[in-house]
Amino acid sequence: EDKVVQSPLSLVVHEGDTVTLNCSYEVTNFRSLLWYKQEKKAPTFLFMLTSSGIEKKSGRLSSILDKKELFSILNITATQTGDSAVYLCYTGTASKLTFGTGTRLQVTL
Amino acid sequence: EAGVAQSPRYKIIEKRQSVAFWCNPISGHATLYWYQQILGQGPKLLIQFQNNGVVDDSQLPKDRFSAERLKGVDSTLKIQPAKLEDSAVYLCASSLALGSSYNSPLHFGNGTRLTVT
């Protein structure tokens, strides 16, 4: 059975800290891994990763995929209170998407 | 572009009652998904449509849940009768992907928060 595990489950940091969120997977016929940010409304798309070792970057957020060790990390530098959210990852094959349980990040002043 | 529209935003019902949710995907998106997200968990796929055909409904509790996408655009999800454990957020998502779910990001609606008492 396909499995996606995110860690940690929750995290509290101070504004300005750097955080690293992990998404590991065991899926058949892996094609892609996607990261989303979920606040109180709809999850919003952050990154899609298909190639190993190539970093995707958007402002203070970056992500990289390791297809050999079967995981991805999402880095957030200089965190702000607006980064408080649940971060979801999911893997995609040609026929199926598998979500992780999410990491709840809280950034405090 | 307009996003995925869902209604209602909130619904409170008593157990054994029925409820229906509506979703209008982004124009031109062939694939539509319904997810159930219980508090503290990741979204769980209930059903996936490709145009008006069902691709995957293996996790849909068919004794009480039903969904349709008759004209390949809007979709409705119904629960009848509801149970306490159905309390969750029901997310609708759509994507451009036709045949390959991995290469087109999902676009989510704001969800319907269902509380069953």
Image (cartoon, rainbow, N blue to C red):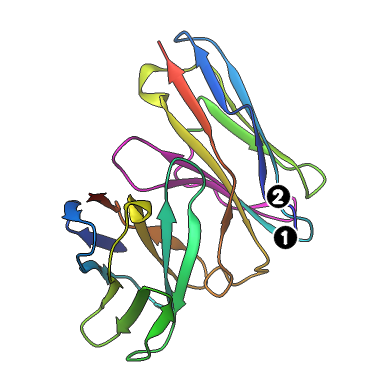
Please report the residue visible at 41 percent of the width from the left and 47 percent of the height from the top: B43
Residue B41 drawn at (x, y percent) = 31, 43
Residue A41 drawn at (x, y percent) = 50, 42
Please report the residue visible at 18 percent of the width from the left and 55 percent of the height from the top: A14
For the residues bearing labels 2 and 1, Cβ distance under 8 angstroms? yes
Circle 2 crowding by C-alpha within 10 Å: few under 14, some 14–19, many from 20: many
Note whether B117 is above or below A87 in the view shown.
above
Residue B97 drawn at (x, y percent) = 65, 68
In the rendered structure, the residue with mark 1 lies on which chain? B
Q: Is residue B49 shown left or right of residue A31?
A: right
Q: Is residue A11 shown left or right of residue B104?
A: left
- Residue type (three-letter) at the residue carrying disc 1: His
Name the disc covering residue B25, or none. Answer: 2
B59 falls in the magenta region:
yes
Cα distance in 3D space between marks 2 and 1: 7 Å
A58 falls in the magenta region:
no
Please report the residue visible at 70 percent of the width from the left and 49 percent of the height from the top: B25
- Residue type (three-letter) at the residue carrying disc 2: Pro
Q: Find disc 1 in the rendering and name its residue.
A: B29
Q: Residues in magenta?
A: B33-60
Q: Can residue A1 be seen in this view?
A: no
